[in-house]
Amino acid sequence: MELRDLPSVDELARTADDALAVAAARAVIAEARDEIRAGVDPGDLRSRLRARLEDERRPRLRRVLNATGVVAHTNLGRAPLADAAVARVTAVARGYSNLEYDLLEGARGSRQDHCAALLRRVTGAETALVVNNNAGALLLTLAALAAGRDVVVSRGELIEIGDGFRIPEILAASGARLVEVGTTNRTRASDYDSAVGADTALLLRVHQSNFRLVGFGEQPRLEELARVARRHAVPLVDDLGSGALLPSTNAVLGGEPVVDESVAGGADLVCFSGDKLVGGPQAGIVVGRAELVEKLRRHPLQRALRADKLTLAALEATLALHLEQPERVPVLRMVREPAESVRARATRLAALVGGGVEETVARVGGGALPLAELPSFACALEEELAPRLRAGDPPVIGILRDGRLLLDCRTLRDDEVEEAASAVARARA
Ligand SMILES: *Cc1c(COP(=O)(O)O)cnc(C)c1O
């Protein structure tokens, strides 16, 4: 093709019946011009235009198949919602709702009431408040209870979670002053006791989440901290992070603190995420003593951080499942699924695509239980498929190990196996 053979933008755009066509045609012709000048044949411009338009119309935020074996994968949207939660979101999203309307009184109500009753039942706390995420919950708690005053935290808990969420920085942003006690590996209740002074607003305990110290370490038990807090008449705030709601989940996982134990153990406020082990939408949940929660509710940041109606709808439905049908919460189901049944799924996928079956180790993710290993199985494929599977529709994300691509089946649903198999067939074609 020569430069003079290039069609005009309008001519090329007319070949596609699309509102975006003119801009796309201009881009295709510009590319083709550069290629011709560089001595490269640009090929069929119409099919290039079609491909470009298809790509432009494709949503950027999309569903993917998670074959990484990381259950609450922060980069892949953390918790998939239960069907009941999706149904509730759809119902609330399509029309109006009683978000801030009291149906009994026929008057203004509070959006915070919808999840509060369930959260009281699940956690045993006096009351609850829901905001946008747990980082927001912690920020609001510190701003409302400790701005301009001291917050006592163990040096072993000054952690960074995810991409740059650092406890000392959140504290600074809230206007509270950090008072560090103990050492990285050892902090005792007496360290807190001697650090409390006239300016102390609260004691903060932070779950170490994605980090574990092995060897000689010591952190006081919650009950001991609660005694120190009561002696000095300051609140104890427990940031649990992942927030396991059910002891039965813990029977599988071990070691992850359960919210009701923290409430019963003497924490005045407990905050945790909605989309880690709760398995619901992104949210930050604070439960605890009514008079403290009321201070959070009245703080101006509450308005800035409050959860929207879709989040509240999904969270309410998810919490109800925790009480009655926890096996319907996808995160809980995936974490608890016996390895043999994961193996069956991996075997089925391997048979469909002609791959091998391999033992793997799946993880909880989302900063919960970094050391917990969930025995799992994957379908092993050729490494070169990885970028093509990512570029497919739906994209499939696996893990690369020893020169192969592993599709871990703990995080694939039964009904996603065929979809994954077709994606592999397309990637090979
Ligand atoms: C994950 C985590 C947070 C942040 O929660 P988001 O819901 O991601 O904002 C805060 N504190 C702890 C201990 C965590 O594990």
Image (cartoon, grey):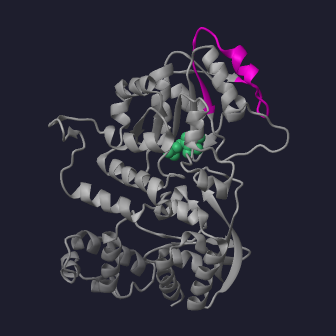
Percent coordinates x, y for residue 174 in the rendering: 49, 26
- Mark yes or no: residue 74 visible: yes
Q: Is residue 69 above or below residue 212?
A: below
Question: Ligand 1 lies in which image quarter?
Answer: top right
Residue at the farthest right position: 216
Percent coordinates x, y for residue 339 in the rendering: 66, 72
Percent coordinates x, y for residue 144 in the rendering: 44, 23
Magenta stretch contains residue 202: yes
Residue at the farthest left position: 106
Going 76% across and 28% down the picture, which residue do you hit? 187
383 and 3: which one is in front?
383
400 and 49: which one is in front?
400
Q: How many marks?
A: 0
Left or right: where 224 falls relative to 385: right
Q: Is residue 214 above or below residue 330?
A: above
Q: Is residue 409 above or below residue 111?
A: below
- Mark yes or no: residue 164 visible: no
Magenta stretch contains residue 48: no
Percent coordinates x, y for residue 195 in the rendering: 69, 16
Q: Quadrant of residue 128?
A: top left
Going 21% across and 38% down the picture, which residue do you hit? 102
Left or right: where 196 falls relative to 19: right
**Quadrant including the N terminus:** bottom left
Q: Which residues are magenta?
A: 181-205
Going 57% across and 52% down the picture, which residue do you hit? 366
Left or right: where 284 falls relative to 223: left
Going 18% across and 81% down the picture, which residue do you hit? 14
335 and 409: which one is in front?
335
